[in-house]
Amino acid sequence: MYRGAYVGWMQSNHPMKTATITQARGVFWMSASERGRLVAPAVPVKSTVGAGDSMVAGVVLSLARGHTIGEAIRFGVAAGAASVMNPGTQLCRVEDVERLYAEVGIAPSTR
């Protein structure tokens, strides 16, 4: 489905807080009042195991710290990117997440 049509359909048919579409290159997200597209930083990939879980954990942690949904999703993208830098099922390192947070690109979102 075309992204603009998908956004309109989600907003009118599904009263949810946030929806995300994730890809290796980043994430498109929207809430009832905001939307955005974030570009994941380029990192060496050693294992993708747990990348999605790390992203969700980063979002939840950031929200628990009182950040906005946009900041939380950006932190989640950084956590997911940091997790793929480690072999096997190793967890991401906080210093990698914090460094990568600054490297997560904010791209213009399209309707």
Image: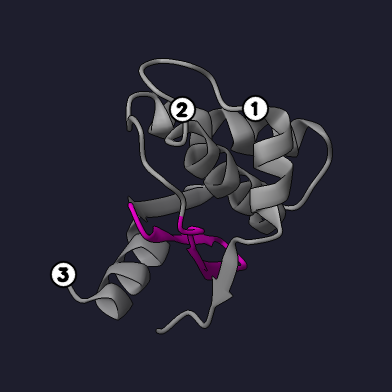
In the image, what residue type sits under mark 3? Met
Checking the image for residue 1, the label placed there is: 3
Q: Nearer the viewer, mark 2 or mark 3?
A: 2
**Mark 2 to mark 1: distance in Å?**
9 Å
Establish if 7 lies above or below 48.
Answer: below
- In the rendered view, would you say 72 is above or below 83? below
In the picture, which quadrant includes the N terminus?
Answer: bottom left
Which element carries disc 2, helix, strand or loop?
Answer: loop
Q: Looking at the image, do the residues carrying marks 1 and 3 touch, with CB atoms under 8 Å apart?
A: no
Q: Are marks 2 and 1 in contact (CB under 8 Å)?
A: yes
Q: Local crowd at mark 2 within 10 Å, few (<14), some, or many (≥20)?
A: some
Where residue 29 appears, as percent x and y from the top left, is 47, 60
Residue appearing at x 46%, y 36% in the figure: 85
Residue 40 part of the magenta-drawn span: yes
Identify the residue under disc 1.
Answer: 93
Residue 34 is marked as none
Q: Which mark is residue 86?
A: 2
Q: Is residue 13 above or below residue 79?
A: below
Q: Which residues are magenta?
A: 24-42
For the question of whether residue 15 can be seen, the reply is no
Kindly state the secondary structure of the residue where label 1 is placed.
Answer: loop
- Circle 2: residue type: Asn
Give the Cα separation between the discs numbered 1 and 3: 36 Å
Question: Which residue is nearer to you in this view: 104 or 67?
Answer: 104
- Could you tell me how far apart the alpha carbons at marks 2 and 3 are, in whole angstroms? 34 Å
Depth check: give the residue in front, 5 or 54.
54
Front in this rendered view, residue 32 or 22: 22
